[in-house]
Image: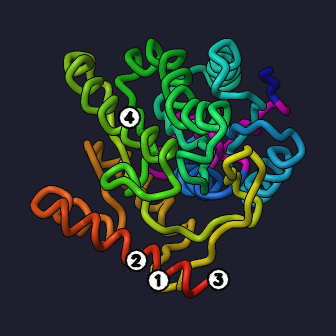
Amino acid sequence: MSDLLTTAPTAGRPGPLAGRVALVTGSESGIGRETARVLGELGAAVVLNGRCPERLARTQALLRGEGLRVTGCVADVTDYAACERLVAATLATFGRLDILITNASISQRAYFADMQPEVFRRVLDSNVYGSVFPLKAALPHLVASRGSVTFISSISALNGMPSGSAYCAGKAALANLAHTLRLELAETGVHVGVVHIGFTQNDPDKRVLDAQGQPVPIAHRPPRWQKTQAEVARIIVRHVQQRRQRTVISALGRLIVLVHTLLPGLGDWVVRRSLRRLRNLYE
């Protein structure tokens, strides 16, 4: 289903992105909401997206109350027909599309041997098709505007994490998809990028599934390991503005890239040791 909540306000803020139109999937909450806020503060008109009409309406009202030019559209981005309607609603409201940020995803906390196959598929679909389908629907319009698509991946894509098999696989797929599309679309002028986010403060109701597909509590980590959602959002938008190919957020993420490339065995040992310490700390 796709449903435009209301028409958008006619005026937005001046700024470096004035005149640009951005679509951010999974922006009814969390990092997506904060990314939409930063885009709006820089002058872009923003289409918010999510699956919960009530939550999406609250976020739309919040950002409009801050003077931002936003509207919301309910759509399940793992459904291609819904993505076509989402893009059509964007064009009907704002007349163009310049920036697509595919942020919607479901996470997990379950070991592969315990996971029900349909749960694995649900997590993988949200992270892969939840990016593929919006881009497929939006691509002709991004070509027309010589615009930008950014996939939100994770440092988990750089080095596998126990209890995150489907999530890691999906996020790694996005990194390779971005590389492939960058080659295929090189002559079109479309920017294709990927951002690997690290540990970030999450909303309490972030969707994390157990092996049976039931929601599980968010793991709390020491503050020094985390960035705020606003910090991550600013990095994502700067990545888009600079049309970067890849951004790895946090020193930890960059260290993972280095160790995984040069000393993969050491990287696996560090991950296993860190997870044991976290389990001891929180259990």
Residue in front for this viewpoint, 245 or 127: 127
On screen, residue 21 above or below 254: above
Residue 112, position as x, y percentages in the image: 53, 46
Label disc, if present, on residue 283 of the rendered structure: 3
Disc 4, disc 2: CB below 8 Å? no
- Going from N to C along the chain, the mark reached first, 1 or 3, is 1
Task: Find the residue positioned furthest to the left.
Answer: 262
Crowd tier of the residue under label 1, counting other residues whose Cα lies within 10 Å: few below 14, some 14–19, many 20 or above: few
Q: For residue 178, say whether it is visible.
A: yes
Disc number for residue 277: 1
Residue furthest to the right: 54
The amino acid pointed to by label 1 is Arg
Which residue type does callout 4 highlight? Ala
Residue sitting farthest toward the front: 113
Disc 4 target residue: 173
Residue at coordinates 73% horizontally, 55% vertically from top-left? 63
Neighbourhood count class around disc 3 (C-alpha, 10 Å): few under 14, some 14–19, many 20 upward: few
Going 54% across and 35% down the picture, which residue do you hit? 124
Identify the element where label 4 is drawn: helix
- Look at mark 2 in the image and give the residue it sits on: 274
The spot of residue 277 in percent (x, y) is: 46, 83
